[in-house]
Amino acid sequence: MLKIKNTLTNELEEFKSTKNNRVTFYQCGPTVYWTQHIGNFRGMTWGDLIVRVFQFNDYDVVHVRNYTDVGHLTSDTDEGEDKMEKGAKRENATPQEIAEKYIGIFEEDAKALNLLEPSFKPRATGHIQEMTEMIQELIDKDFAYSTDLAVYFETSKAKDYTRLSGQKLEENIAGAGSGDMNDPAKRNPADFVLWFFKAGKHKNALQHWPSPFKSPLVENGEGFPGWHIECSAMSKKYLGETLDVHMGGIEHIPVHHTNEIAQSESANGAPFVKYWIHNEHLTVDGQKMAKSEGTAFSLAEIKEKGFSPMALRYFFLQAHYRSKQNFTWEALGAAQNGLEHLYNQIRQLGTELGDIDDDFRNKFLEAVSDDFNVPQGLALIPELLKFDLKNEDKLATLLEFDKVFGLEFKAVLSQPQEPIPDPIKKLVQTREEMRKKKNWAEADKLRVQIEQLGYTVEDTIYGPDVKKI
């Protein structure tokens, strides 16, 4: 039984799909005006892990992860400059060129981290018609209104507008969805923008399209969509009016996802999402990742320092998605060493495949099905490696686990490690016996002896890791 901590109810709930053995899953993707930092990729990796856990539970997953290439302003609350235009000005390029460049980098990084390809990867700019149709539906149903500067959603008419965040409307984020602060025709401070006209502070917008909406300041309703309507329109097109699962970062709860619910349910007259999932932030030395602080590290920077993308993935697997995770270079180094030792352990099992152990598989399934507790599943590996099973059965079981982990265990088998000589193995075994007896002095002497013979030994949770110097 798969259980999910649903942000909407704050309860751990048994998962039940809207259609048997099929999961519709929408994940908020990147705004492609810059290289995504590893904090963004923690969320993307957890989206991948969640898809894999559903598949491990025999569900067919339709996974949509979008690209935002217009309409996301520098504030999530419809204030500031369009991020795509900001990127275009920074690099003296068009917004389209910026989108192509950073989508390309994102997809290379996603592949390096072994993220599964989503079923659909829609771009906002390719779905303007779907957005204008949904906005028109909201206008026709009296949930939205036009001013000279924008089309707004009227939040006072939404049912239980803040039920996702649990906030009182007057205590919501200051200026949430405020649009143009100089718009005297805006009815409520919390009303958010569905469509910006090419007027006012956006009169020089680089990306704009005609629309059926009317403003005396522009011809043909020229303008561009607000950020929130994009996800509602794209998710509806590919997944229908009611989704099984919607995922994003916790920062999306009070504004972006709150607004998605309001506009989708008002337009469609149907529940929007059954299960909301929100991942916590990756911090750096306990602080939020920030470009201004030089701590928004990219995957390219990770690789430049000699770390593999798989080491970063392995690092991400060690903390639950609802927990903050603190990044340090030392922690990443420990993850890389731990992963390399695990790969060595796998190589030592040989290449012959046996039978998947049912008891370990059931333990693993139970762990990862408890609100996607992948770290708990990861903790089963040392237990499995030390258990009294044939090597070929251990290998088969580990490869079964890797359907969720995505750490490419199978590829490791084609990279055999140079075998450790028997005399070295005997010294390592004797050292382990001394350690169990807490004879640390003798254990240290054996470590020195092993090093003098050209090998290092490192103690890990999986056992001693022996390498040639």
Image: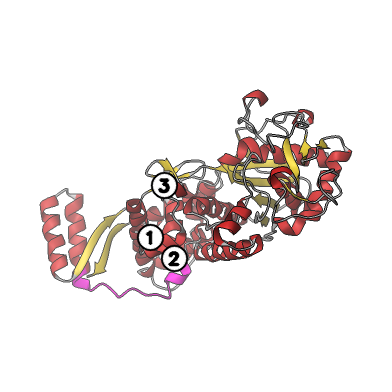
| Pointer 3 residue | 293
Residue 375 lies in the magenta-colored region: no
Q: Which amino acid does the dot numbered 1 rest on?
A: Leu
461 w.r.t. 97: above or below = above
Determine which quarter of the picture holds residue 333.
bottom left
Mark 2 Cα within 10 Å, few/some/many (few <14, many 20+)? many
363 w.r.t. 14: above or below = below
Residue 416 shown left or right of residue 77 in the figure: left
| Pointer 1 residue | 339
Residue 411 lies in the magenta-colored region: yes
Residue 314 shown left or right of residue 69 in the figure: left
- State the extent of the magenta-drawn residues as a range: 409-424
Q: Which amino acid does the dot numbered 3 rest on?
A: Glu
Colouring style: secondary structure
Q: Which mark is residue 395?
A: 2
The percent coordinates of residue 188 (x first, y second) are 74, 28
